[in-house]
Amino acid sequence: MKKRNVALWVYFAFLIMPIYWMLNTSFKTNNEILNYMHWFPHNFTVKNYVTIFTSPFWRRGFLNSLAFVSLNVVIVIVAAVPAAYAFSRWHFRGDKHLFFWLLTNRMAPTAAFIVPFFALYSNIGLFDTHIAVALAHALFNLPLAIWILEGFMSGIPKEIDETAFVDGYSFPHFFWKIFRPLISQGIAVAAFFAFLFSWVELLLARTLTSTAAKPITVTLSRSLGAGGWDWGALAAAGVLTMIPGALVVYFIRNLMAKGFAMGRV
Amino acid sequence: MKNRAWWFLLPALAVMSLSAFIPLMTVINYAQYSVFPGSAPQFIGMENFADVLGDGVFLDSLRRQVLFSIEILLIEIPLGLGLALALPKKGKWVGWSLVLLGIPLLIPWNVVGIIWRVFTRSDLGAVPAIFNWIGYGAYNASLNSGDAWWTVVAMDVWHWTPLVILLCYAGLQAIPEEFYRAAKIDGASAWSTFRYVTLPKLRHSLILAVLLRFMDSFKIYAEPFQLTGGGPGNSTTLLSIYTSRKAIGGFNMGFGAAVSIIYFFLVILISWLLYTIMMNVGGGSSK
Amino acid sequence: MAKIDLKNITHVYKSGGEETRAVNDVNLTLAEGTSNALIGPSGCGKTTLLNIISGLLTPTEGQVLIDGKDVTELPPRDRNIAQVFQFPVVYDSMDVYGNLAFPLRNRGTPEGEIEGRVQEAAELLGLDDRLHENPASFGPEWSQLVSLGRGIIRHDTTALLFDEPMTDVDPGRKLTLRRRISQAQKRLEVTALYVTHDQHEALTFAEKAAVMKDGQIVQYGSPEELYERPVSTFVGNFIGSPGMNFIDCEFAGEDLKAGKFTVPLNETMRNSLDSSWSGVELGVRPNLVDVYDEPEGGGEIPAEVTLTEHLGSYQIITLKVEGIGVEIKAELPLEEKTDIGSEKFIGLTPKNIMLFHNGEAIQNEKK
């Protein structure tokens, strides 16, 4: 009992340390950051955060990120729910192969796809738009979402569908009224994983945008190089990018244990 | 009925054609040409593939990549399993622990790199200060390749062990209490209980954890790119960093495309091998 | 093979600020080598009591004695008790042989001895053909046999406990499983306790049964005793299907009055009544209700048939008596004509009825 608690405390300390250091750095002046090794800010300042909030540059980055992330979640859910339903309810020629092919896409190394993505989206005029990033992220998110939802749906007896049809429900009516509430947790979990990946990914988002749709992560990466190192502002921006994720995790905390079972246990 | 299934799959297939099928075809096409900017592409068949496999930097990155994936799997899987077992099953701290574990997973990958850069840089990081304090003053992740390597590994452990913990924890929650009661009645020791109840029941969660961690570690890009940029020298140049250099910065786009295909093929092949091995280990065995 | 004594067992679950008294001051002795059942409605504390005996729970108060030795604080493995759970537990990383050998290996029994014992147990349970199969693919019936096998494999097993083992088993397979369990128990002469909410299951398995209600044991006796001499209206109603009929009665001189009808009593019954009571409850088993087509002149009560149910070799009819708020169920041979709506006459004779006051039996002596 004691030993496991010690292990947990040590681990959680390790988990918090780098984040704490970032937070600590974000409240320091650049002078203090570079010249002193202080475990907490001696000259506490919020100047770094002011820099970020007053820069349209950073603000736009945040909004762009939120735009393609939400778009991605919507695309993924709308496409994954019917597909997962088909896989969980019907056997058709090639269903196993198709399912497996979808999953292999989850294995695609992002770096391998940047050039063709760039070429394709430039040719069809989608380069530097939110939809381009959202579609590109669907390469990884859609297979995972279909897989998760298929797991949840297979746990729901087919008899429910059959009873509803016998009772005279039309398909859309049945789907919305009866089936959707039953898989709402699965949808939440799939949406969570779609959000997660789209929000954290850098390489595709960077390749497919230049100015109009540039996400916050790229803004952050680029600002490193431009004209000296503003470590304080960088740390503050880093802290800010952690907030949306932390909020999402906080709101779904009661679904976490079940969510990571991904409907498969 | 059969046609209905295809209608249901239509939206997903439409999206996948834009995000997977067409791009993949493009890469396969490119890979057979010599493509230099400003001149017409020239068909050269499999030559690009031969060039890639003969490229020392590619082979070095691949070797490094395999080593990296093995190392992080060896650390993260046992650590994640152990911590999931240590985590209380209920109580007021469970919710908060889960939130805390979820946070690293939702930090943008390059920000993870930045966090660790701020954390480990010799001029402003806490890590060098701590190493200095315990007597290893020479620590420098941007000059010393050994330090850089282990810093990248530590970052990955920090970033992804929570995923393993959450997967295992979810699996543990799903084991019916009766199994533990029966093991107690049968007089099983803590080790036997773990070996014959917990581990077999967690098999699917562990397979999923190994596969996800393998795939994602094999594809890792933004974190080491931001932390070390692949250096010092090429000491932390993993396969993705090499590939993106070749794909974007390289002169011959055909060469980059060939790298991409070999890369993709390797991920699928190794994932399949891992899956097959794991499915055959720990099944029903006699006596 | 052991005698089990429960002395003043009380168990309280605490969750949040709330306390639930699941078991309340239970005293019970299970004689050596007997088969016993513990029955009661869901939530009455049966499973808690079982887990206290096996050692999975330590009672809040009281003692558990096995052959006179206090084992209250001992863990399950030191009590040598076997338990079969509601949910069939098999270790699916081992074959049947490995499952059966598991408790022995945990105790460090030499492999040579294990082999003989596994054979012996497998033969007893009819598992000998399936020793090298993986039980993961077994249905609940066979899985339960494997769990039972792990229980009886040790020679020093003091008691076998069953926690509603039939729940997941197909109705058609229940009989076979029950027979195997019964055979094994008799052959090994091991003390057994079988928890269930299905009285039929309990009464066919057990020599003696304890009826539990709200954390307390209300009656412990043979199936005949429980059926013929229930100590309370609860037991009367719970045992038997359908349960006992109850009619509220008032005193009317020497006899009882139910609505406007008179029910005659005998001498012993009259003597057991207390005139300060406002009335008593009359109980009668459905098979002891006399039903006539015509009045027999003994003060029979007219009633109307409202429902008939055919149950194989007999039928249960429901009768409604005008002026009395209850329906009376009676068991009749199939040949009787019992059209719905027809009029019948009910005879309640002293030798067939029991009297209860405030739910407690007044006298159990049958004359």
Image: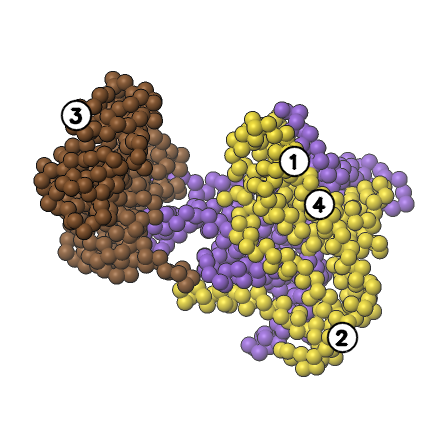
Chain colours: A yellow, B purple, C brown
Assess whether mark 4 and mark 1 are in contact (beta carbons under 8 angstroms): no
| Badge 2 element | helix
Amino acid under label 4?
A: Val
Residue C197 at x, y = what percent? 30, 41
Which quadrant: the C terminus of chain B? Answer: top left
Assess whether mark 3 and mark 4 are in contact (beta carbons under 8 angstroms): no
Q: Name the residue under label 2.
A: A47
- Output the chain of dot 2: A
Nearest the eye: A144 or A162: A162
Q: Which residue is drawn at 17% across and 43% down?
A: C221
User: Rounded to the nearest whole Å, what is the CA distance between mark 3 and mark 2?
Assistant: 106 Å
Amino acid under label 1?
A: Pro
Describe residue C2's horizontal placement relative to residue B44 as left or right: left
Mark 2 closeness class: few <14, some 14–19, many ≥20 residues within 10 Å? some
The circle drawn on residue A82 is: 1
Quadrant location of residue C151? top left
- Output the chain of dot 4: A
Amino acid under label 3?
A: Gly
| Mark in the foreground, 4 or 3 | 3
Using the rendered image of the protein, determine whether residue C5 is visible from the camera's viewpoint: yes
Mark 1 closeness class: few <14, some 14–19, many ≥20 residues within 10 Å? many
Q: Mark 4 points at which residue?
A: A74
Amino acid under label 2?
A: Lys
Answer above or below: position of C80 versus A233: above
Q: Which residue is drawn at 75% across and 71% down?
A: A49
- Output the chain of dot 3: C
User: Rounded to the nearest whole Å, what is the CA distance between mark 4 and mark 3?
Assistant: 83 Å
Q: Do labels 3 and 2 share a chain?
A: no
Q: Mark 3 points at which residue?
A: C297
| Mark in the foreground, 1 or 2 | 1
Using the rendered image of the protein, determine whether residue B46 is visible from the camera's viewpoint: no
